[in-house]
Amino acid sequence: MKIPFLDLKTQYAFLEAEINEAINRVLVSGEFILGPDVQLFEQEVATYLGVKYAISVNSGTDALVIGLRALGIGPGDEVITTPFSFCATAESISNVGAKPIFADIEADTFNIAAQEITAKITSNTKAIMPVHLYGRPADMAKILEIAHQYNLKVIEDCAQAFGAKYYNPALNIANSDGLSDIYGKLAGTMGTVGAYSFFPSKNLGAYGDGGLVVTDDDTIAEQAYMLRVHGTQKKYQNEVLGYNSRLDTIQAAILRTKLKYVDQWNQTRQKIARTYNHELEGILGVITPQIIKGHVFNQYTIRVLDEQRNALKEALSKQGVDSMIYYPIPQDQLPVYQGQYSKCNVSHQCSKEVLSLPIWPELKPKMIEKISTDIKLFKQTPICCT
């Protein structure tokens, strides 16, 4: 049995009639840029997330860039973030002229370690950018407490966490600083700005690129709306240098269709993750991810110890099972930043151990069983000597 890392065809087959109707509706309307489906999607997703403003943009990367710009982040500023993420996280900070500052991660969550942030704060620090990696929310209670203490903005990178909820024990901060209770809140709605990606592989994915900026702040929303259309509120009256970053109407129509199912799909992902954990329990040298309430498992990522990760990946491939490494090089060690940062030790170690296994809502139990069996067989096979 050959098992791809991701299968989007099965989901389309389930949604085919609805998706085709949505696309045809746009084609017939002839309104391909900022058409009615864009406005309706923004209203519907704002309601789903419980935010005042949802501004759709061209990609998750653009959501981060526009979010940072709307916050007033620019040259001379520093933004503290995690080294363990896709390059768009740090890239967005650099591309607005600011400097990414990396705080190491927790090995058991893969998210930024809140206790590492404070030591990185300087007079130039303007914001913290946590990433809710693989669909697990970062420790937002502690991050927001630090942000309040040092008067910093928080922009959440939710590229892999649409629909994830924060259920970690919240600190008792509401009465002391006016912050609302965040227990049970959706990822992206706890900071000043949330940024999402609708890349096809995401839990809520388009059939092309797409992104979203969310906020409850009127001024930030006004800036984001301007920035996505060349810095204008009124055509040909460019007020700031902006971008051409609009969500296509066809993609908005597709996302409206899929938004109705995202909670159901996220629940299925959680069920698959629990099944994986049960099947892989007790395998020496394999650490499975924690199953916590609110984690939506955009990726199911194990750690493979004793420098066997690459060998396991190759062995799975020979058995017809695709897997991926997210991420083989931490952001602070990417060639674009060569020599600028010392290694974050936990992030560096995890980059040598992580392996993401196939996960999508339609993944069959027999596929999980085969993948798990292949891993067990690999771990039981002696490393041979000649």
Image: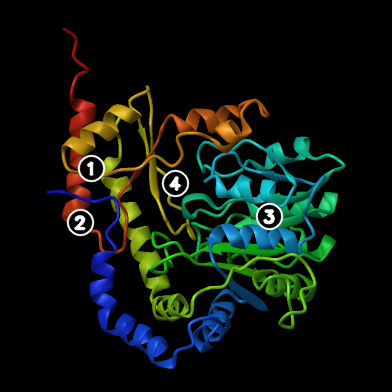
Q: Position of residue 319 (x, y in %)?
A: 16, 39
Q: Identify the residue at horizontal 33%, vertical 64% (top origin).
A: 268
Is residue 51 visible to us here? no
- Estimate the spatial distance between the alpha carbons at disc 4 and disc 3, rounded to whole Å: 19 Å
Mark 4 lies on residue: 290
Q: Which residue is mark 1?
A: 372
Residue underneath mark 3:
141
Please tell me how crowded label 3 is: few (under 14), some (14-19), or many (20+) other residues with Cα within 10 Å.
Answer: many
Report how far apart the C-alphas of labels 1 and 2 lie in the structure: 11 Å
SS at mark 3?
Answer: helix
Considering depth in this image, is 63 or 365 the residue closer to the camera?
63
**In this rendering, position of residue 176 left or right of residue 349:** right
Q: Amino acid at mark 4?
A: Gln
Q: Amino acid at mark 2?
A: Pro
- Residue 372: where, in percent of width, then height? 23, 42
| 85 lies left or right of 206 | right
Q: In the displayed image of the protein, which residue is found farthest to the bottom? A: 29
Q: Residue furthest front?
A: 236
Question: In this rendering, would 109 be left or right of 372?
Answer: right
Q: In the visual, does 141 lie left or right of 28?
A: right
